[in-house]
Amino acid sequence: MRKVFLKTLAAIFFIAIMSLPFAAQSQTSSIMYASSRNPLMNNANPAFFPSNSKLYFSLPGANVKFSSPLAFSSIFQYDSAENKTYINANNILDTLANGDKIRFGTNVNAFGFGINFGKFFVTLSSQVKVDVGFGMPSGLVTFLNEGNYGHTGDDVLELLDGNLINARVYAEGALGFGYKITDELTVGARLKMLLGYLDLSNAGSSMTLTTAPDYSSMTADLDINMNYAGCIDIQYDSVNDQTTYNIRTYTPKNYGFNIDLGAKYETDLFEVSASILDLGPGIHWTDSVSRIVSAREDNTFTFEGADVSNMMHGGQMDSTYTQMLIDSLSSLAKTKTINGGEDYWTSIPTKVNLGGIFHITQGVSAGLLFHGEFERGLVKVGDVFKKKNVGFYSRTSLLARVNLYDWVELVASYSLTSSNGNWNFFNPGVGLTLTPFRTLQIYTFLDYISNIYIVDAKQLNISLGLNLFFGSHAD
C-alpha cells in the first residue's frame, strides 16, 4: 500500500481534531470519588461501598470523557475579510509543541454487583473501555513551523516517534473485596481480568531529517514499525499493492490483568482515603498479531535544494513547499503488513487518588482530592523492554457534597488540571444522584467542564446510568 507520509499525518490529525466533541480520556472523575451513595465510587477506590445500601446492582451506563490541549475554536479561525474559515496551523503547532496529547476514550459499564456483609463486602463488575492518544513529535512541530532553517549538520530533526498514536479497545471483568479492620479503617483490593479486542501501538517507528550545512541537500530516514492485534484482519496484496480491512466477530485470546488497592479511614468528623488503580502488566497481545512496517529495504531519500523555511504563511500551509515534500516523501511511506508478528504487552495507565473529606454536618461535607495518572506506554515486545513512562496527568479538586433526606445527593467540584506541566484553572463539575424509594437510583455527572461553550471546551467528563438497591437504609 502506497501512502504519502505527510498526507497520512494530516489525515490522522484532522480526524482526531474533528472527533474532539466525542473524544474521551481515561480518568477518574472527582465527582464520582466524592459521592457516598453511588456504587461507581467503588471503581475509584475498592475500599468504598455505598453508605446507605446492603446490596446493589449497577445497570448499563456510560462514561464519556475527552481532553485536549486545543479547543475547537482555537483550531478553526474565521477570516471576515475573505469570508472563509481555515485551520490555524500556527496555533495547533505551537500548542502541541510541548508534547501534550489529544486523548480519547470511553467506558461502558455493562454490569455491576455488590453485597455488604457488615465486616466485609464483595463487588463484581464488567466494563468495555476505549483508549486513544494522539500526539505530535516536537521535531515535526519545529519543522512545520520553521522548516529546516537553522537545523543542519548534527542538528537532526526527529519528525516521527512513538508519541504519534496509540489506541486500544478491551473488556474488563473485576472481582473486589473490602474488609473493615476497625470501625474507622476499611481496606479494599480488586483483581481485574483484561480481554483485548483491538490494539495499535508504536513499536519503534521513527523518521529523521538531516540537512547539509550548506542547505544543498536534505536526507530523510523513515522506519515505520507498528504493532497491531485484534478483530480487524489486515491483508496486504503485494501484486496489486493494496491493503484490505475486514472486521470479524470472534472471541479474542489477548489476556491480561491488573490490580486496584484502596483504603479509607473515617470518623464522625472527617474521612481520608487513598487508592492506586491499574497496577500491573496490562494486556498480552497474542491473537491475530500483525506488524505494519516499511516496505522498502532502503528507506533513505535525499533531495536537493531543500530549504523549506517558508512553509507557513499566516497560519496556513504554503502548497508550493508542501507539494514538493509530498512528492519527494511519497516513495518512502510505502508500508506492508506482516501477519503473525511477535506477541507483545501494552500497559493501562496507572492512577493514584488521595482524598480528604471534612463532615461539616450530618448531610454536608467538603474536601480535597488529588488524582494523578501515569501513562506508561508500551511495556514489552518479545524480549525487548521499551520506555515505560511517557506522560503524567494530574487533577486537584475542591469537593462539596450535600445529602438531602435519604434519596437526594448533590456533589460539586472545582478542579485544577495539569497535563505534562500545562495547567488549566477553570474546571467546575456538578453531579446529581436520585434514589426514590431507596430502590431505583438515577445519576448524572458533569465534571472537568473547561468552558460552558462546547467550541471553547478543552475537556469534559459525562456519566449517566441507573442502579438498583436492596436492603437500603437512611444514612
Image: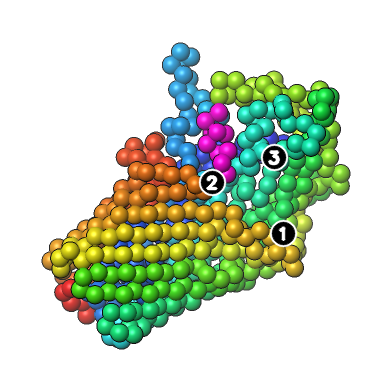
Query: Residue lying farthest left?
Result: 405
Tell me the distance, in whole angstroms, between the alpha carbons under discs 1 and 3: 24 Å
Labels 1 and 2: the sequence-earlier one = 2
Position above or below: 102 against 92: below
Q: Which quadrant of the view contains residue 264?
A: bottom left
- State the predominant SS element of the stretch in magenta: helix
Badge 1 amino acid: Ser
Tell me the distance, in whole angstroms, between the alpha carbons under discs 2 and 3: 16 Å
Is the residue under label 3 in contact with that under label 2 (CB below 8 Å)? no
Q: Which residue in the structure is indicated by mark 2? A: 101
Quadrant where the C terminus lies? bottom left
Tell me the distance, in whole angstroms, between the alpha carbons under discs 1 and 2: 25 Å
Q: Which quadrant of the view contains residue 289?
A: bottom right
Quadrant where the N terminus lies? top right
Q: Which residue in the structure is indicated by mark 1? A: 290
Would you say residue 472 is visible in this rendering? yes
- Percent of width and height locating residue 159: 69, 40
The structure residue drawn at horizontal position 72% and vertical position 59%, both measured from the top left corner, is 290
Q: Secondary structure at mark 1?
A: strand
Labelled disc at residue 232? none
Q: Which residue in the structure is indicated by mark 3? A: 159
* 359 relative position to 287: left or right: left
Q: Which quadrant of the view contains residue 272?
A: bottom left
